[in-house]
Amino acid sequence: MRGSLTVTAAPTFLRDYRKAGVSLQTLAEGAVHDLLRRAQADAGGWRRHYDRVAGLDGRVLEIDLAGGPRMLAIDNGELILWRMGDHSLVKKVAQDRPPWPEQSQPLPRQFELDTRVSLFPDDDDRGFIDFANENTADWIYWLDDEQSAAAEWLETSILESWDNGVPLHAGLLGGPGTGKTTILVWLLKQLALVEEDGLGMRLKLKAPPSVVNQIENSTGWDLSSYVLVGSSIADGHPRDAPEVILVDDPGSLEDLKLLMTGFPWSSVVFGFDPLQMADSVTDDALDAFEDSCAVETFWFSSCYRQKEAVGEAAMHVAQVVAASSPFLREDKKQRHASDRAILTGKVNNLEFVNPSGAIQTTRDPDWNEWEEYWRYIYRLRRQGRLWNHWPPLLVVQDPLADINPTWLARIDAVSSHRCSTDDLQQVKGLEYQHVLMTLGETLYSNIDSGFEGSGQYSYNRFRLFRIPFSRAKDSLTTFVFPDREPEP
């Protein structure tokens, strides 16, 4: 690499780096940028910023990424990045032999100071991004083996499709927080770096504007040139059609079919939770879609978004709704359940990998109970444990809940998103540290205990409550108020 210090990579580091999520990859790139700048500014003194690792070869330097995650490098006068891992990395490599210089390889170009990845704005130089409590050891930075295998297969298959001109259709399916968007964002970065004969891959992203906004805020990317406009090549010049379209949270299976038909030569990779679509999807409908569009499907069941207690509470709501019915007649209730039995089983049986989490449900709260919750949120803010890159709190309000208007003023002191229970789709695909549900007694009883005979309209409304309950990472709090008296 150009500058006063040469930095290369061992094959073990490159494997670790590829298995990292985009946030951790960004931290690693930023840490190397910082190291190179220090070496340029102080060729003889940059090493004092890094510790030698006790118990390992004396040449091993530790490069901290975010408290828990770290990199190890071999200092031979030149620097070889050796491994990248979580807080237990030193123990894992204690018996490993450090790489020899002849084993090292050039670093990917995004590590170079003078090379700009096209996802970033021209004047962007952010170093690394600190996401507060995401930097603790129990948070996900890595694609697990299942996710990594799917991501690697998709990248290889997309490149093969680019070469042979035969489009790929593939789907990432699973419940909330199982890594679908994580893989799509990982693919977006890897494919944006691809060049062949000096030409880059034409790559587009189709996602709700709020999801695009959250990705940009979380990564520092500028996706304005990547967002897909229109739904077919007829909306632009056919020669400008993308080779690859990544789709996050499509509205329906029909939307996906129209997109594939509208861009017949584009590879389309999509991710969604079948139970969060606007219309209720049946087992047969999904099978027919996969067959007709030749879709390669990957299912995921390990949830990394939600801490264990929070995820279990969200799944309680999902399972109650799944066991409920828009019908009263027994034969219709049974047919409705059997039509969705496979999908419901796959999506609602999740393993919550990250421990802990906070759950609180308070019925008919008084002012002191409401105030105690806000003191807890403010304390997190003072401790620097709330996000800065995205509103850390989602507040979901039931219009029929009888809440004292003066109580709601407490919300304004913390950066938050507000969403009505009548418009739950607006937070689909997003995530927050904390979620506050303010519900009326009738609505709470329906989603806590179940219902039947609601009719299709009300059933679809209740069905989408899996969305807000599954947005929280760290805490899920529900205040249940009396129902508002109907206006005369």
Image: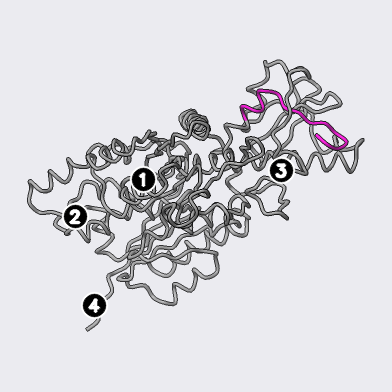
Looking at the rendered image, the disc whose residue lies closer to the viewer, 1 or 2, is 1
Left or right position of 25 against 74: left
Residue identifier under label 1: 273
Tell me what residue is drawn at x 42 percent, y 60 percent.
Answer: 436
- Secondary structure of the residue carrying tag 1 is loop
Disc on the earlier residue, 2 or 3: 3
Distance, label 2 to label 3, CA atoms, is: 52 Å
Callout 1 amino acid? Asp
User: What label sits on residue 287 in the rendered view?
Assistant: none
Looking at the rendered image, the disc whose residue lies closer to the viewer, 4 or 3, is 3
Could you tell me residue 76's position as x and y percent? 84, 23
Could you tell me residue 449's position as x and y percent? 23, 53
Please state the extent of the stretch shown in magenta in the rendering.
1-16
Residue identifier under label 2: 451
Tell me what residue is drawn at x 63 percent, y 55 percent.
Answer: 384
Residue identifier under label 3: 30
